[in-house]
Image (tube, rainbow, N blue to C red):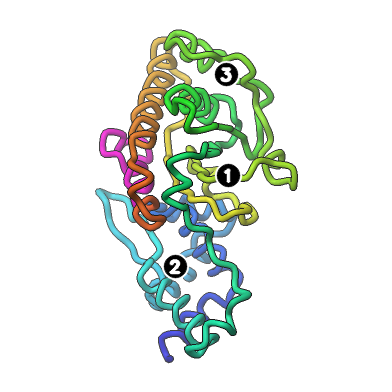
Amino acid sequence: MNIAVTAFATLGHAGRLSVFRLLMRHMPQGVRPTEIAEALDIRQNTLSHHLSDLERARLIRSERQGRSLFYTVDLGRAGQLVTYLVDDCCRGRPEICAHLPAPAMFSRQGMERRMFNVLFICTSNSARSIMAEALLNDMGQGRFRAFSAGTTPRGAPHPRAVALLRQAGLSADGLRSKDLAAFEGEDAPEMDFVFTVCDRAASEECPPWPGHPLSAHWGIPDPVKETGTEAEQALAFAAAFDALRRRIGAFVSLPMPELDRIALQKSIDDIGRDTKTAGENA
């Protein structure tokens, strides 16, 4: 009881709640304090107080990697709080809580037959998410229908991204930059999976997706930000393309009919921790 009181009192502050929610959106990856402060537009000293309070309540944890400190949500403690609320509400009588929304679980039988809708999100929707859309539509072999969108779309796919796709024998026809709002309306296709492929997009707040799709953060460095020589720019785009192709290859190879929702969530989180792209969030 005392643990719950402390945790909920800590989350009762709007600033601390914003930090907690941002860290949750980045899970299972950690976030540096400087990145949190920039995303939430708060001063470093204010953020330090919020992080200390959240860590003291055991809602988050920190881990030093090299010279950087990364913060993540303590999922075990967060799960205990949710369980506490639901158990206390239902008081052993599930019919009382029948109105509570529950995430839809994938039917194993349905998973063998249906096509899955997958949305890739980045900031400008000009390179990473565009390439991911084309890659999954090709590698998914008719089992996946991929879309992409940006939180602040650039207006058109980057020429280097289009050129890379065509060099790989993939179609770039019909690819365009789209605003995320286009996928949040009533007429938008319902998503089964939502992946953010840049840290900035993962940090931005979005309303809950209809149907409770599984989501994960697959951070990839933005090749558009490479300002070196032509060769260095080309290398940055090729590295992003290869990282996406590797992750999407692992995704389409998952034995989905054999996995429940929890196992599937863990699998897509693990793909986002691909050690071969360990430098992407450095």
Q: Residue at x 74, y 47 (%)?
A: 186
Quadrant location, the N terminus: bottom left
Q: Position of residue 259 (x, y in %)?
A: 35, 51
Badge 3: how crowded within 10 Å, few (<14), some, or many (20+)? some
Q: Say which amino acid is labelled 1.
A: Met
Crowding near pointer 2: few (<14 within 10 Å), some, many (20+)? many
Q: Residue 51's spot in the image, x, y percent?
A: 44, 67
Q: Position of residue 138 (x, y in %)?
A: 46, 22
Chain part drawn in magenta? 266-282
Decide whether residue 201 is among the magenta residues. no
* Residue 151 seen from this side: yes
Q: Residue at x 53, y 36 (%)?
A: 120
Q: What amino acid is found at the position of numbered circle 3 in the picture?
A: His
Task: Residue under label 3, please give it.
Answer: 158
Separation of marks 2 and 3 at Cα, in angstroms: 38 Å
In the figure, residue 181 lies in which quadrant? top right
Front label number (1 vs 2): 1
| Residue 186 appears left or right of 194 | right
Q: Nearer the viewer, mark 2 or mark 3?
A: 3
Q: Which residue is mark 2?
A: 51
Return the mark for residue 191: 1
Left of 206 or right of it: where is 131?
left
User: Within 10 Å of the Cα at label 1, are there few (<14), some (14-19), or many (20+) other Cα atoms?
Assistant: many
Query: Residue at the location (61% across, 70% down)?
Result: 14
The residue lying at 44 percent from left, 16 percent from top is 233
